[in-house]
């Protein structure tokens, strides 16, 4: 990848936010645009309470989210298509599509934050997520219920 090329050299953050906002309004799903390393370029749009206020609210949680976003984005760039993957933080399903210009992987469009089967979270899964997020299991189960 040509390190001198950055997505924001080609389009403004404001325009990316505008496009992303329209996308999330039409689809009703959460989305964010990141650089190839998973660091956000745009503001998060339509994120769930679980992701915005628990997963991404601490430095450790954000790091896991960025790692997950980077993983999904790099996999999608390598395969040259949209990919689904489990988020590395809360275990939700996420999707990633690469933003490629020429041979340069400049970023990722990340969207999703959903469960494979609505409201299906085993007690073991909720305990595991609660431990990772340092939160009470009933709170986490309730947050998953609203996804």
Image (cartoon, rainbow, N blue to C red):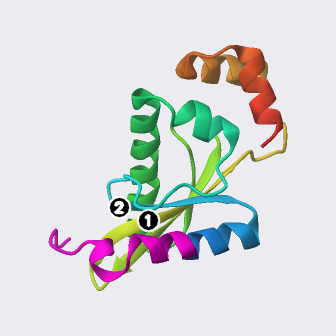
User: Which residue is labeled 1 in the image?
Assistant: 108
- Are the residues at dot 2 and dot 1 in contact (C-beta closer than 8 Å)? yes
Residue 12 part of the magenta segment: yes
Disc 1 crowd rating (10 Å Cα; few below 14, some 14-19, many 20+) is: many
Depth check, front residue: 55 or 95? 55
Q: Quadrant of residue 106?
A: bottom left
| Total numbered labels placed on residues in the image | 2
**Residue 92 painted magenta:** no
Residue drawn at the location 72% of the way across and 16% of the way down = 137
Classify 111 as above or below 122.
below
**79 or 6: which is nearer to us?**
6
Instruction: State the extent of the magenta-drawn residues as a range.
Output: 1-18
Q: Is residue 68 above or below residue 122?
A: below
In this orientation, does residue 11 appear?
yes
Q: Residue furthest bottom?
A: 102
Relative to 80, residue 102 above or below: below
Tell me the quarter of the image containing the N terminus. bottom left
SS under mark 1: strand
> At numbered mark 2, what does the secondary structure look like: helix, strand or loop?
strand
What residue is rendered at 74% in x and 21% in y? Answer: 139
Q: Mark 2 — residue?
A: 35
In the picture, measured across the screen, residue 144 lies left or right of residue 100, that is right
C-alpha gap between disc 2 and disc 1: 6 Å
Q: Position of residue 37 (x, y in %)?
A: 32, 54
Q: Position of residue 70 (x, y in %)?
A: 39, 52
Residue at x-position 60% and y-position 52%: 94
Point out residue 33 in the picture as x, y percentages from the top left corner: 47, 63
């Amino acid at each position: 990848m040509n390190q001198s090329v950055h997505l924001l050299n080609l389009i403004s953050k404001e325009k990316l936010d505008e496009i992303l906002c329209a996308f999330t309004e039409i689809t009703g799903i959460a989305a964010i645009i990141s650089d190839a390393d998973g660091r956000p370029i745009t503001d998060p749009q339509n994120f769930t309470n679980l992701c915005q206020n628990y997963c991404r609210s601490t430095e450790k949680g954000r790091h896991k989210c960025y790692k997950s976003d980077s993983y999904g984005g790099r996999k999608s760039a390598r395969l040259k298509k949209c990919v689904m993957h489990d988020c590395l933080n809360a275990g939700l399903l996420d999707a990633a599509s690469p933003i490629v210009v020429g041979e340069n992987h400049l970023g990722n469009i990340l969207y999703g934050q959903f469960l494979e089967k609505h409201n299906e979270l085993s007690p073991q899964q909720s305990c595991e997520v609660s431990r990772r997020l340092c939160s009470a299991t009933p709170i986490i189960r309730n947050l998953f219920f609203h996804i």
